[in-house]
Amino acid sequence: MAVATILLLLSSVFISSQAHLQLLADPNESFTSILISQQGLDFVKNLLISKAILSMIPLKLPRIEESAKFPFLGNVHMVLSNITIYKIDVLSSYVKPGDHGITIVASGATCNLSMNWHYSYSSWLLPLEISDKGSASVQVDGMQVGLTIGLENHGGTLMLSLMDCGCYVTDISIKLDGGASWLYQGMIDAFEGQIASAVENAVAKKLKEGILRLDSFLQALPKEIPVDDNASLNVTFIDNPLLSNSSIGFHISGLFTRRKNVPVTKRYHQSFHPSVFCKDQSKMLGISLDEAVFNSAAALYYDAAFMQWIVDKVPDQSLLNTAGWRFIIPQLYKKYPNDDMNLNVSLSSPPVIRISERNIGATVYADVIIDVVEAGQVIPVACISLVIRGLASVKIIENNLAGSVKLDDLAMSLKWSQIGNLRMYLIQPVMWTITQTVVLPYANAHLGKGFPLPIIHGFTLHNAEIVCSSSMVTICSDVTYSESKNLSSALTRFE
Ligand SMILES: *[C@@H]1O[C@H](CO)[C@@H](O)[C@H](O)[C@H]1NC(C)=O
Ligand SMILES: *[C@@H]1O[C@H](CO)[C@@H](O)[C@H](O)[C@H]1NC(C)=O
Ligand SMILES: *[C@@H]1O[C@H](CO)[C@@H](O)[C@H](O)[C@H]1NC(C)=O
Ligand SMILES: *[C@@H]1O[C@H](CO)[C@@H](O)[C@H](O)[C@H]1NC(C)=O
Ligand SMILES: *[C@@H]1O[C@H](CO)[C@@H](O)[C@H](O)[C@H]1NC(C)=O
Ligand SMILES: *[C@@H]1O[C@H](CO)[C@@H](O)[C@H](O)[C@H]1NC(C)=O
Ligand SMILES: *[C@@H]1O[C@H](CO)[C@@H](O)[C@H](O)[C@H]1NC(C)=O
Ligand SMILES: *[C@@H]1O[C@H](CO)[C@@H](O)[C@H](O)[C@H]1NC(C)=O
């Protein structure tokens, strides 16, 4: 726990965000943007189509019953029962965002059905009722399914609505097996229209149910993602999604907030949303984080007042005995010969993170109180103010943004002293060593884990690239999908 402070501070710098959307809120409150490119939309569309098909089949259609008068035969009663769609294939499909919503069209879909048929009739020619039955297979060859989905911010979450939905069967063929099927084939063809509309209605109904489920899934996404015991990431959606002709953009708050509803004191303002800019247009997804996200983490951990710790173990333990300081601060050794020491490190103001095209810089302001422990009593003897400048590099580990820091520059000044003047040029190398061997390794151990990016459970970043620009870090990436209980249950259970 000794070195927790700086580490927490630095690790906080790299904590992340997960995604969600909201109603026309203050547009200045978004610090993380997400852009899903046409490639990303295609990926999601294919996933949704395969999930929708899995969730639909086997699909039972209502039985069809009809009586009709035929010459010579008289009144014929016909029943089609147990009509089941057991296979659906989609040959081609596309997704297109537009002013009025997102349109998904599956064209050239085919489906296979099975059913039982039954006929009965009696006529004045024959004294008894005649009946026959068998099974039939039905192929639907030309089916076009289209839907338009509206996407809106509703109180910080994303709301999905079905604006338009249609299913049209253009070509159907029925093949009877069993019974005197040759005899009835012609009659059953008269049912084509009814079977086609039963398929159209059943598919459209399932799609509507599916959109409702997807909507509940989106609305149930959390507005905060826990980062650790004390912090979470605010993933409230800000504004409506932005639909262009080939992408969808989302703005989310993205700031770190204190858990347990303690409001964050510091406020951040900016004049425009961060905009996602990926040079590689073929990536599915872009996520841009404004430097305010990192600074909100720094402020949160600073406010939480646990950025303070006592260093009583260092790799070179002689540095924590006055004997080790004999030639650096002779008067200290003279006054407290061979006494143990510790360093009481605290931050004097929140760390500041600056992002530019060239690098990510972190400046940490710390006060180091040199304590002497004499007969169990802690005696503060001097305080040195440090300005630690680090350069950070970031990387993606699974869906986390992680990082590491190396020391770039260390400035120091004497704040106060009980033991007279100190020769800072002699103390400098010691502080440098302690920063390098104690502070940074501890910080990097925490930063190495990183913080979560706003990505829905089940999706994983793949081949991610990180681009730094003025005041912004952008992650450009493809995603892969692996079964996640929540998503599949949302998408596959329609009953
Ligand atoms: C999250 O951000 C939204 C929009 O800025 C804000 O209204 C909400 O109060 C924030 N939540 C917390 C817990 O700070
Ligand atoms: C109804 O159809 C299903 C699937 O084709 C089949 O497994 C089942 O045996 C059929 N039931 C009857 C009563 O024919
Ligand atoms: C399903 O129907 C298609 C044509 O629409 C046909 O080519 C295919 O063989 C059928 N599959 C099965 C399993 O019956
Ligand atoms: C959370 O804050 C408390 C003090 O407020 C601290 O003791 C604890 O270590 C913190 N936990 C984490 C994971 O930072
Ligand atoms: C998308 O819109 C841009 C201008 O906003 C236009 O240049 C481009 O051709 C459009 N692309 C398609 C596929 O419609
Ligand atoms: C949002 O930013 C604009 C431009 O910086 C500023 O004029 C406006 O007052 C800000 N709105 C709020 C609510 O902070
Ligand atoms: C460390 O220093 C702070 C003042 O900066 C003081 O409040 C705190 O009590 C000190 N902690 C210990 C354990 O000496
Ligand atoms: C999905 O489920 C896991 C555990 O089953 C849970 O931790 C996670 O928060 C869920 N994700 C969403 C988006 O609901």
Image: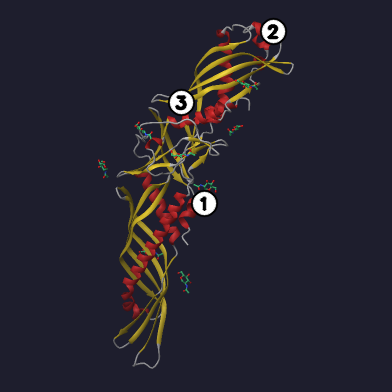
Q: CA distance from mark 2 to mark 3?
A: 41 Å
Q: Disc 3 marks which amino acid? A: Ile
- Counting from the top left corner in percent of width and height, residue 295 is at 47, 29
Q: SS at mark 3?
A: strand
Q: Earlier in the sequence, mark 1 or mark 2?
A: 2
- Counting from the top left corner in percent of width and height, residue 42 is at 36, 48
- Left or right: 374 in relation to 162: right
Residue with the mark numbered 3: 353
Q: SS at mark 2?
A: helix
Image quadrant where one finds the N terminus: top right
Q: How is the image coloured?
A: secondary structure
- Which residue is depicted at the point 51% across and 27% down? 404
Label 2 CA crowd tier, 10 Å (few <14, some 14–19, many 20+):
few
- Which residue is depicted at the point 41% across and 44% down? 22
- Counting from the top left corner in percent of width and height, residue 317 is at 66, 17
Q: Give the label, 3 or 1, closer to the camera.
A: 3
Rendered-image quarter of ligand 5: top left
Residue with the mark numbered 1: 485
Tally of numbered discs: 3
Callout 3–callout 1 Cβ contact below 8 Å: no
Q: Earlier in the sequence, mark 3 or mark 1?
A: 3
- Counting from the top left corner in percent of width and height, residue 180 is at 38, 81
Q: Disc 2 marks which amino acid? A: Lys
Q: Which is nearer the eye, 72 or 388? A: 388
Circle number at residue 335 = 2
Beta carbon of the mark 1 residue lies under 8 A of ligand 8: yes
